Image (cartoon, helix red, strand yellow):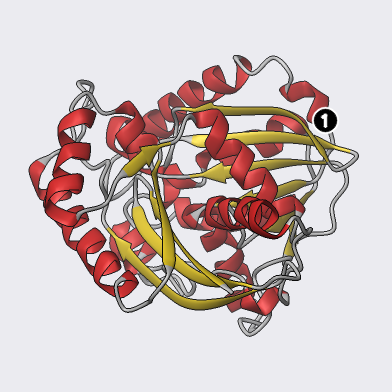
Amino acid sequence: MKKFAIIDLGSNSARMTISEIHPDGSYAVLERMQEMVRLSNNMGPEKVLQKPEIERTLKALTDFDDAIKKYDDISVRAVATAAVRQATNQAKFLELVQTKVGLKLEVLTGEQEAHYDYLGVINTLNISNTLILDTGGASSELILVADKESRHEVSIPVGAVNISEEYLEADEISAAALFKAFTAVDERLNSVSWLRQAHEFPLVVLGGSNRTLGKISRRAKHIQDTPLHGYRISSDEAFAIYTDILSKDLEERRKVPGLAKERGDIIVGGLMPLMAILRYVDANKITFSQAGIREGILFEKINEITGEEVIDPEPAAMTVDIDD
């Protein structure tokens, strides 16, 4: 049985999963680690990774590497997404990770990121026609799925952190700032020529901000023991939750059940791509996914090693988000 570690360095958080792959295509998760690193904080228009964020990230990656070293005969794949992809000091950062941690980070393209999201979702949820949205800290990935096949995959540079930093106040959100932010998001969506093909398609969403929406819903209904993977809400409920969040200042947002304190300053911006897309494609249903990039990479590896289709665990075994 092969052991495989996947590190996913996102713009907001760093996550690692260590799994054991079985010959029949099944797998067992041995260990998970997660850290909120906020790597994309304060990158500014120059897109420069900043020293405090780099140091915080190096510490998290070192902890991950220490955990990996406990296992014999283990292979590792470490990937980075939008923050590193966009950074003008990318080469220096990758060299730091190599020399100080001993990890070789692979920078995924936006299309690769979207494709791994697709693999993670399609192998764990019973879906046929849908639009997948993964909102991260510095980008959002969109995948159009028809008859279970990925038809279009794209990454746009709008995410929870960069929207919040560029357009929104940290405390009370003004109407003017909200309008400017939504206008910018809408302009990005209008550039995706195929997006209208998803008209009235249900949405599958992932990423920390989107999952927070599901957690708030579960807490409000007192059903937080219900698995988030596969959990569904209506667009009307999503709009109602977002309206409530908008009515609160930062301190009040941090007290919302299901919303982690660390996410209170970016949740308005983080949910903005989803709110815009719900209106754009006139979707009426949202399904939450706990499977994304890491699961997609794992499923690709399982097929490569065993030649078998993935035998997925129960939904309860899906990746736990950092805010849980």
Residue 183 rendering spot, x and y as whole percentages: 49, 22
Above or below 184: residue 307: below
Q: Residue at x 29, y 66 (%)?
A: 64
Report the residue that reaches farthest toward the left. 51
The answer to whether one can see residue 55 in this image is: yes
The answer to whether one can see residue 259 in this image is: no
Disc 1: which residue: 199
193 horizontally vs 78: left or right: right
Q: Residue at x 51, y 40 (%)?
A: 272
Q: Quadrant of residue 46?
A: top left
64 horizontally vs 43: left or right: right
Where the N terminus falls, by quadrant? bottom right
Residue 123 rendering spot, x and y as whole percentages: 75, 56
Q: Residue at x 18, y 56 (%)?
A: 101
Between 300 and 168, the residue placed more toward the observer is: 300
148 horizontally vs 212: left or right: right
Between 62 and 174, the residue placed more toward the observer is: 62
